[in-house]
Amino acid sequence: MTFDECNQYLKLRAARSSETNNPNYWAYDTTSISSYSETIPLVKYGFNKEHNPLPQIVLGILMDCNTGEPIDYQLLNGATADVSTLKKLFLDHSNIDVDTINLILDRGFDSFENLKLLYLRHTNFILAVKSNSTIIADTFKANWKTLKARNPLEYIPEYECFGRACKANYNFQSKELGQIDSEVYVHMFYSPDKAVSELHRDDLILHGCLEEITERERKKRINKKLGDPSTSLKAYFRRGEKRKMGA
């Protein structure tokens, strides 16, 4: 099978997936493949999730969540950031009716441009977002106390946590359509067990910081009491002079 035939097959497979499954859930993510190659043009230095110091190629994979089959892939420049790959995905599948698609993305794709792209293409989506965004911060502030109250009706047994879907307004300006006013559902989750483990982790970090500060202060006191050795040695060395060290 040639490269062009492979691409044609995948495009047909994606088109078929968008027609037959109802609802259609597609998950898209990227990974990096490290390489020693000095001749492959796509091999470039970029952000590596595994902190590998080698240059890499970025591989984007689109999966059909109903069947578990890959329906598209992208080989990208190793310096390509996740957030910038979504536009190319839509361009590659511009002939598909995206109204039938529910796209699932992780936090690496959270950006204003991607949100605008999803809205303008009328694509349903589930996106993990950064907690410091205005929508998330406002929704969190309004619902956090009641979510922590652990209402039994909000408990999700299969995930062992409490969850709530909150409606929020999302507004943005588009050159093509002007002011866009839409609604999103912010899904919030609270796991008491995870909260305890994270508090324990924070306590260990704070304890480590306290020990480090205490040790630094102890060394400062010792150095102040004994004097800085480098200061006393400077008395024996002057620029432009030769002096012998005496016993």
Image: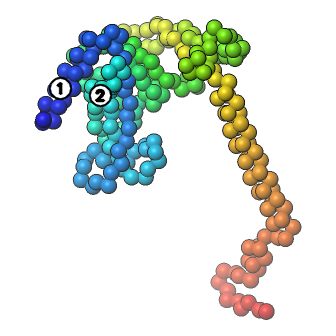
Q: Is residue 218 above or below residue 105?
A: below
Which one is nearer the viewer's eye here, 151 or 104? 151
Q: Which amino acid type corresponds to the residue marked 1 in the rendered image?
A: Tyr
- The residue under the point 43% across, 14% down is 173
Query: Which residue is pictured at 29% across the width and 22% down the height?
Result: 90
Percent x, y for residue 72?
Answer: 27, 28
Of the 4 image quadrants, the one containing the N terminus is top left
Q: Residues within 10 Å of mark 2 (few under 14, many from 20)?
A: some
Q: Mark 2 touching mark 1, by CB under 8 A?
A: no
Q: Which mark is residue 70?
A: 2
Q: Quadrant of residue 149?
A: top right
Q: State which quarter of the image contains the C terminus.
A: bottom right
Question: How dense is the environment of label 1, judged by Cα within 10 Å: few (below 14), some, or many (20 and up)?
Answer: some
Residue 75 percent location from the top left of the image? 28, 37
Residue at numbered disc 1: 9
**Residue depicted at 49% across the width and 24% down the height:** 128
Does the image show residue 142?
no
Badge number at residue 36: none
In the rendering, at what x and y percent does residue 34 appear?
Answer: 36, 48
Secondary structure under the numbered disc 1 in the rendered image = helix
Q: Amino acid at mark 2?
A: Pro
Residue 161 versus residue 232 in the image, above or below:
above
Q: Quick check: can you spot residue 83?
A: yes
Could you say whether the residue bearing mark 2 is in a helix, strand or loop?
Answer: strand
Camera-side residue of 158 and 126: 158
